[in-house]
Amino acid sequence: MEPFRDLLRKPTGKNVYWDSQLCHKPRQAQEVICQLAKNGLAYYDKTRPTIIMTHWSKEGFGFVVLQQYCACQSADSPFCCKGGWRLTLCGSRHLTPTEAGYAPLEGEAFALTWCLQKARLFLLGCPNLTIITGHGPLVKLLGDRALKDVINPRLFTLKEKTLQFRFHIKYLPGKRNTAVDFLAKYPAMRSSHEASDVDLEDDIQVAVACATVVALEQDTIVLDEDCVRSATSNDPVYQLLLARVAAGDWPQQQSQEVACLHPFFSVRDRLAINLDLVTYSVDQGYIRLVILEDLRRQVATNLRAGRQGLDSMLRRARQSVYWPGIEGDLQHHHAQCTSCDEHARHCFPKQCWSRPQQNTTSSKSSQICFR
């Protein structure tokens, strides 16, 4: 098609001289494409080993279904030899606004689930099915992790949809999956909201609401979802973080990022957007609400409500909220609370409570000891 490329160059409006050679070129290109398809495509054969490969990006996601036509017994399949695996089915589509806010693990799991459902007539009951992913945590999620151990409601629903398939999942570096990477970055099909988006919205809303810290005593301010959203709308750092997570355009190095977002750079793959709020989750763990700086002191006060110990504060925080350095801030906040110390005395008998004298030969301060 080289003679036609000159027509695409600027400035436009060139004269076109159509001759017999140009008439022959499209037919020749058609024959080449048909021959490549004949050599690369194959009908599905239920007796052959089958591999599916998926990939998710901020533009869309795609998948390919390959079947083995070689005799190789290599762990490097389907890259064991050229032409040894042939294409049976492929597909791709753009993301909906809801899917664009997924965390990487959620997006990769959704792409895989969509592939299984799209090719279910081929893959249901497939005796030798292997899934290849370039996202390491997905192997743990869909491998040996029990359904009851998945706390994230979106991942729970996605994993539940894969239980009807029998497969083995393994990891290969994503840079080798060039075909699905191309399909994910240049998807072919546009789609409206699916029913699964609506079904998951209620579950995510409940999770975010639970992540919002609610005060336990009357002397503290109640923080609900509307209060947090109202505060974030006036915070420029939070709005910048929200835009960065939505676009997924993080720079390659932390030094290239704006200074106010440096603390979030190391956890950028764990951030997602739910209901216009930034959330944080580790693998299949709790969905935690990212708290902006102006509300962190109040959240720490609410976590301390009830005068529970430091371990209880940290445990509640790990299930509900997040900000960079949260555990150190909570430890400092708890150490400054004298009323927590007084209430803790009443929780143990006097003979079980002792405060050792400060050692004059050591620079360490005295510590509370429980026998």
Image: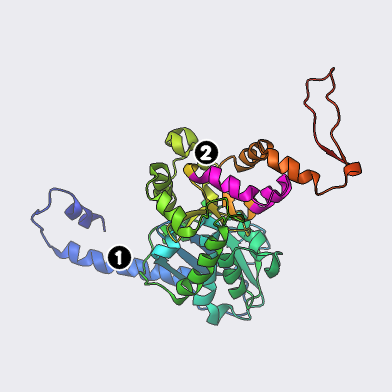
Give, as a single range, the part of the protein colored magenta. 295-316
Residue type beneath disc 2:
Pro
**x, y (%) of residue 296?**
53, 44
**x, y (%) of residue 207?**
56, 63
Residue in front for this viewpoint, 56 or 223: 223
Q: Is residue 316 visible?
A: yes
Real-space Cα separation, disc 1 to disc 2, in angstroms: 53 Å
- The residue identified by callout 2 is 263
Say whether marks 1 and 2 touch (CB < 8 Å): no
Q: Residue at x 44, y 69 (%)?
A: 91
Magenta stretch encompasses residue 115: no
Q: Helix, strand, or loop for circle 1?
A: helix
Residue in front for this viewpoint, 189 or 109: 109
The residue lying furthest to the top in this view is 361
Q: Is residue 111 visible?
A: no
**Which disc is residue 29 wearing?**
1
Q: Which residue is drawn at 21% across and 57% down?
A: 4
